[in-house]
Image (cartoon, rainbow, N blue to C red):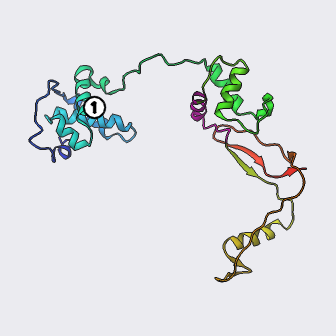
């Protein structure tokens, strides 16, 4: 009863209409529900449902349960009824209507493998994959007859594969790179030669725009993988 007391303290006597669904818990059932309501790893919705049942078993009306747990009465009524009809199994979500589309595991594996390759390896004229392009290419390549971008995104999210993201990297070849970079970074911090810049001193930045066309990267990009974004070298060769 120690678990239930905090929820009972604010219940009003006006909320006492009887429910046709009366819950009577045995010691084992109560212990199971109390453990579920305290479990840190349980889903929040499951914890809430267990608390609803515990309050209902203590004789608290649906309106008072709704007030204490900040939910609507229909929610309290629903899970009281579900527990009366099905027991602890009634606190699980019921199967959704309709048959979900089932893809063979080979299709899922092929799409994931495709996402971990550079698009050029499959002849796609792309710099990097998107979920929409992966779905379209999988259908065109005959991997599956139909595939939606949302399904592709869900599959890739399971392995933290995000081919549409990339990280840039560069090989510093200038022997004085550290010295030059240090000056630039100091200016970002409004410092120059060890002293802070004054209020009347400003930093102007300009970028070079050579009249040559970038045709390919100096180093080939590294493809993405589980938990690793694609890595693209930031230097281009004319």
Q: Give percent across and percent down for residue 122.
A: 78, 28
Which quadrant of the structure image shows residue 63?
Answer: top left
Q: Is residue 189 above or below residue 47?
A: below
**Mark 1 = which residue?**
32
Q: Is residue 54 left or right of residue 100?
A: left
Nearer to us in this view, 67 or 33: 67
Which quadrant of the structure image shows residue 27?
Answer: top left
Q: Evaluate whether residue 178 shows in this view.
A: yes
Q: Is residue 58 left or right of residue 29?
A: left
Q: Residue at x 59, y 18 (%)?
A: 103
Q: Residue at x 59, y 29 (%)?
A: 155
Graded by Cα atoms within 10 Å as few (under 14), some (14 to 19) or many (20 or more), the crowding at tag 1 reads: few
Q: Is residue 191 left or right of residue 78?
A: right
Nearer to us in this view, 145 or 180: 145
Q: Give percent across and percent down for residue 7.
A: 20, 44
Q: Give percent across and percent down for residue 54.
A: 21, 35
All told, the count of numbered labels is: 1
Q: Is residue 173 above or below residue 225?
A: below
Q: Residue at x 64, y 82 (%)?
A: 199
The residue most toward the front is: 211
Highlighted range, magenta: 150-164
Q: Quadrant of the N terminus?
A: top left
Nearer to us in this view, 98 or 180: 98
Label 1: state its secondary structure: helix
Residue 156 among those drawn in magenta: yes
């Amino acid at each position: 009863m120690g678990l239930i007391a905090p929820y009972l303290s604010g219940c009003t006597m006006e909320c006492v209409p009887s429910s046709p669904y009366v819950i009577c818990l045995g010691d084992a059932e109560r212990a199971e529900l109390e453990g579920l309501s305290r479990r840190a790893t349980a889903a929040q919705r499951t914890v809430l449902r267990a608390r609803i049942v515990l309050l209902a078993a203590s004789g608290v009306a649906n309106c008072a349960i709704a007030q204490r747990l900040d939910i609507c009465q229909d929610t309290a009524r629903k899970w009281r009824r579900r527990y009366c009809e099905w027991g602890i199994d009634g606190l699980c979500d019921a199967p959704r209507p309709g048959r979900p589309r089932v893809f063979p595991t080979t299709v899922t594996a092929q799409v994931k493998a495709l996402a971990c390759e550079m698009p050029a390896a499959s002849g796609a004229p792309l710099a990097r994959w998107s979920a929409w392009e992966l779905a379209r290419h999988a259908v065109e390549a005959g991997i599956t007859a139909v595939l939606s971008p949302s399904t592709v995104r869900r599959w890739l999210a399971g392995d933290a594969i995000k081919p549409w993201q990339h990280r840039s990297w560069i090989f510093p070849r200038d022997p004085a790179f550290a010295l030059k970079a240090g000056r630039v970074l100091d200016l970002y911090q409004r410092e120059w030669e060890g002293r802070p810049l004054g209020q009347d001193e400003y930093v102007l930045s300009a970028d070079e725009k050579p009249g040559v066309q970038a045709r390919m990267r100096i180093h080939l990009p590294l493809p993405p993988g589980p938990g690793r974004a694609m890595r693209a070298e930031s230097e281009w060769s004319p």
